[in-house]
Every structure is written in C-alpha cells, then in structure tokens.
Amino acid sequence: MSQREHPPVLAEELGKRYSRGWALRDCTLEVPAGRIVALVGPNGAGKSTLMGMITGLLRPTTGRISVFGDEPSGGGMHRSVAFLTQAKPLYPQFTVTETLRYGRNANPGWDQAYAEELVEKAQVPFAARVGTLSGGQRTRVALALALGKRPRLLMLDEPLADLDPLARETVLRTLVRECRTQGITVLLSSHVLAELEDVCDHLVLLTEGRVRLAGDVSELLRAYPEHRTLSQLALAHMRMGVAA
Ligand SMILES: Nc1ncnc2c1ncn2[C@@H]1O[C@H](COP(=O)(O)OP(=O)(O)OP(=O)(O)O)[C@@H](O)[C@H]1O
C-alpha cells in the first residue's frame, strides 16, 4: 500500500498510563485525510496526550498508533506532520528572516517562497526580532514555520489561546483557507467550541481519557437531532461523559 493511502492517524486500543493513572484508554479512531478535525474535551481529558503520541514524543502504554502508515518513534516527528502549540517554540532573539532560515535548515521539504508569502500576508516585518512581536504576529510566524514545512497533517494544540478575539478570527480564517486549498488534514484542539463551529467538519470528543464521540459532524448532527450545532452536541456529550 502506498503511503498516500494510509490515513493521517489510525489509533487502535491506544492507551497511555502515567504514574497517576490512565490519561487515555482504549482509544480507537481514525483521523480521515483532508478533514479539519476538532479535538475537544474537558481539562485533563487526554487531548495533549493523544497529540503527544502522534508526534512520537510520548510512547503508548497499550495498543497501536500509526501516522501515514508509520509508527511514531522517539526519533523526531513524522516528516509530513507539523505541530503548533500555545507555547510556540520560537527563538525570541531571532529575526523573522532568521526564523524562516531555521525552518529551511530543519526541514527537507521546506517551501521558502510559501513561508515568506504567509509572513507578508500577515504584514509582519522580516527584520523584526520575534521577541518584540505581538502575540498575534508571533502566531502568524509560527504558522508560517509550520506550513512552510509543507505538512500533510497539521496539529494545533490550543494555538490561539493568547490572542484577542479579532486576531483569533483572522488567524483561524487564514489557517482554514490555507489548509483547505492545500488539502492539509488538521487536528485542532480548542476549548472555544463556538469558533470551531464553521471550521471543523469532523469531531473527536474525549472525556476522562476515553473517546466519547467521533465522526463526521453532519452525520453526528443527523444522529443526534436534538442538537443543532457542534457546540451543543459536544457540550452535551462532555456533560454525559463527566457524569458517567
Ligand atoms: N507527564 C505527566 N505525568 C503524569 N500525569 C500526566 C502527565 N501529563 C498528563 N498527565 C495527566 O493525564 C491526564 C490527561 O492530560 P492531558 O494533558 O492529555 O489532558 P488535556 O485534555 O490536554 O487537558 P487540557 O485541556 O487541560 O490541556 C490528566 O489527568 C493529566 O493530569
């Protein structure tokens, strides 16, 4: 089977146990190609743990996970995956130009023209040091760094948490436009359910380390007609999961 035919993520009975107990249990799911997937759940539900296992930074305790058909290893992230977190590991003393140069040196498939175009569109000065940029500008640079890698799967763990509502909307719009145009699969973790509404077409909902709901958003809304929106659906299942 060619790598193209493997789904971006396939988890089978995946589990992760820390010293304090299970963070994720019996997690079986597929992240389908080309979708924008909302990964939601209350605090401590296991979202970051799942993402950590997709990157290969965390090793599963039980079960299996594959990323484009490959088992993640501790030897670095899959070359087709980019990961953006709220922490945005950018070097504050680097200029934007130097940050992109770092991206080029670190990534074999790097697309310099595309990364520069994203920075230009965001109107961030190339000569500015990253440490002097606003939160919104830093996020746009981090996004250029992630997309310049030309990933096929982009994972975002609460990347917009420190942005004002206007910047959140702008960044999210840019992100969705770029990913839809490029056919990039997105796994987006956020607590702001309302802003996932018009963006995500697939849902993975975790509560207490278990997959409570997963699937195509329109199909799920048809299966649960008492809920009209992704937010209502997710919130109701989060309540059930926590009460269970
Ligand atoms: N390194 C660790 N050692 C011990 N327990 C951990 C560790 N990392 C996470 N956990 C625990 O695993 C569970 C799941 O945590 P995780 O960070 O995956 O949740 P989350 O859904 O991302 O939460 P949040 O929305 O608050 O970011 C929590 O109970 C957490 O305390």
Image (cartoon, rainbow, N blue to C red):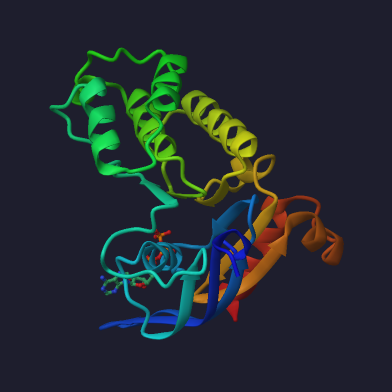
In the image, what residue occupies the spot 17% across and 30% down?
Answer: 92
Residue 238 seen in render: yes
In the image, what residue occupies the spot 55% across and 58% down?
Answer: 39
Image coordinates for residue 82, horizontal then vertical, percent: 41, 48
Which corner quadrant holds the N terminus? bottom right
Ligand 1 rendered quadrant: bottom left
In the image, what residue occupies the spot 66% across and 70% down?
Answer: 213
Numbered label tally:
0
Q: Compared with residue 31, is residue 230 higher up or lower down, i.e. above or below?
A: above
- Which quarter of the figure has residue 148? top left
Which corner quadrant holds the C terminus? bottom right
Residue 160 seen in render: no
Depth check: 4 or 217 in front? 4
Left or right: 21 in relation to 64: left
- Which quarter of the figure has residue 174? top right
Image coordinates for residue 212, horizontal then vertical, percent: 62, 73
Image coordinates for residue 164, horizontal then vertical, percent: 44, 28
Depth check: 171 or 8 in front? 8
Left or right: 76 in relation to 23: left
